[in-house]
Image (cartoon, rainbow, N blue to C red):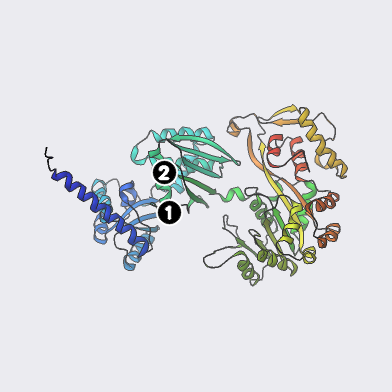
Amino acid sequence: MTSTFDEDKQNKQLDDLRKQEEEQLVASLAESKYGMPYIDLYRLGIDNEALRTISHEDAMKMKVAPFKLFGKNIFIAVRSPSDDLLKKLKDEMERHNLAPAFYMASGASLQKVWDRYKELSMAESSQVGGIDISGEVLRDTAKKIEHLQDIEKLVREALEGNKIHKISRLLEIILAGAIAIQASDIHIEPEKDRGRLRLRLDGVLQDINFFGLDIYRLLNSRIKLLSGMKLTSTIAQDGRFNIMERIEEISIRTSLIPGAYGESVVMRILDPKSIQMPIEELGIEPYLFEIVKTEIAKPNGLILVTGPTGSGKTTTLYSFLRKIYSTEINIITIEDPVEYHLPGITQTQINLEKKYTFPEGLRSALRQDPDIIMVGEIRDGDTAEISVQSALTGHMVFSTLHTNNAAGVIPRLIDLGINPKILVSALSLSIAQRLVRKLCQFCKKKSEANEEETKNIKVVLDSIKEEGKDFSKYNIKPEGPFKIFSPVGCDKCNSIGYKGRIGIFEAIKTDEEIEKIIPSNPSEHEIKKVAHNQGILSMRQDGIVKILNGITSIEEVQSVVDLKEE
């Protein structure tokens, strides 16, 4: 039996093979020869708005294709990226007040975009930048969003909408919604047969929607484009993009990691408003607050804030800087990375490729005649050494350290190679903190503590009494029965029962008693014992005070500190 030769099928297979080879060649050249990201436009939707930035005639003449416009960012594919061509395009786009990003693409990819010009009616003339998510679209969408349920409803409507604009609209809703309800992170994750959207609100992830894997893949590509990532890469990547919200610039930091069913996308929202918390609203109890105010106003010393990742250390340090900022002092920060911009302060970012590390940044900062230096984190002996020396030579140094509590600061610094005798004079204050969610003031429910809760509360209150701390300062009574509050959930708090977060703190001041024991390389236990006489609440004591004052729940405090043992 002979098979019939199918010429059309054969030609199609040859065309597909040639296209595949061309794509591989362009991808290889883009990376190795031109150092540019490669893009395959066959896998992507093309924005009509982008096409209007370069005429059809000019696009074909220069062998370029504008394919995506987002805010003031224009994405352009080029066939042969010569310096002259890129400069010409850059100048032209900047005249339109656009920032270009260039990608290298095959002839077949460009042809796909050029074919779209034919479909585009220039009669529907639209101003360049008309789909600026950072302006009206974002604000209009945000007006419709008050609760998590509103985002869910709008996402559902967008998924049922017009296919061409579906992904753009979906991303607008997700971003506008997350910013409107003050979420800190957006999670878009693929599962076996669906995509999942979650928002982190007050430190806890909340499910919003599920959608098909086709939608997940299109969202993934769109986010990669926006964040300046490689579309074809399947390794972990980081990127970022900015949204202008009136006069504020909100940065979105994107992280992608590969998983079993595709790439997990996390977008961290760096909204300047979220970091602008006055020192008075951090949750520092009155007695410690007075100590902090005195210590941060001193001309020199080392103040360290400790706690795990996500415990609000950066917010605390920024609130210190804003409290003491004046035009008469020079403040320099060395951060990794600079997440929030503070007016009037010189902020620098470490860059390992350029060998600008924390120690190097500190050395450079000291040459700039600073009064106050903020070091993002003390990670090694060099940074610790220079921070301590700076504090001894007339500078005020703020930084963070990874320890479990305030008493762990001194042993940790000694472990990093700091001479205990020098540490005595440098270290002013060690603060440890955790974040707990605040109960919604509209729906929290009052009840009497059960036997187990009463026992835990009593143990902590007895320790406050034994250490001679004054109950009257904290608006609580040492004897039961104890009234505590629990979450319920209402319209005002997205039916969660909590709204906003507050810190629970402890601190150890380097007073005479502490100074005496530092040279003997004391253990955490010895430091705690001596520090009990300072009158500052420990984290578990501060937590119990906030529970009895109806600020948070016993479950929240138990999730961050052990109430049963000191």
Q: Residue at x 60, y 47 (%)?
A: 274
| Residue extending furthest toward the front | 1
Q: Is residue 78 left or right of residue 462?
A: left
Residue 6: percent from the left, percent from the top? 14, 43
Looking at numbered disc 1 in the image, what kind of residue is underneath it? Met
Q: Is 112 in front, or is 143?
A: 112
Residue 5: percent from the left, percent from the top? 12, 43
Q: Residues within 10 Å of mark 2 (few under 14, many from 20)?
A: many
Q: Is 14 in front, or is 375?
A: 14
The mark found on residue 219 in the picture is 2
Q: Is residue 213 left or right of residue 299?
A: left
The mark found on residue 443 in the picture is none
The mark found on residue 229 in the picture is 1
Disc 1 element: loop
> Do the residues bearing badges 1 and 2 touch, measured as CB atoms within 8 Å?
no
Mark 1 or mark 2, earlier in chain: 2
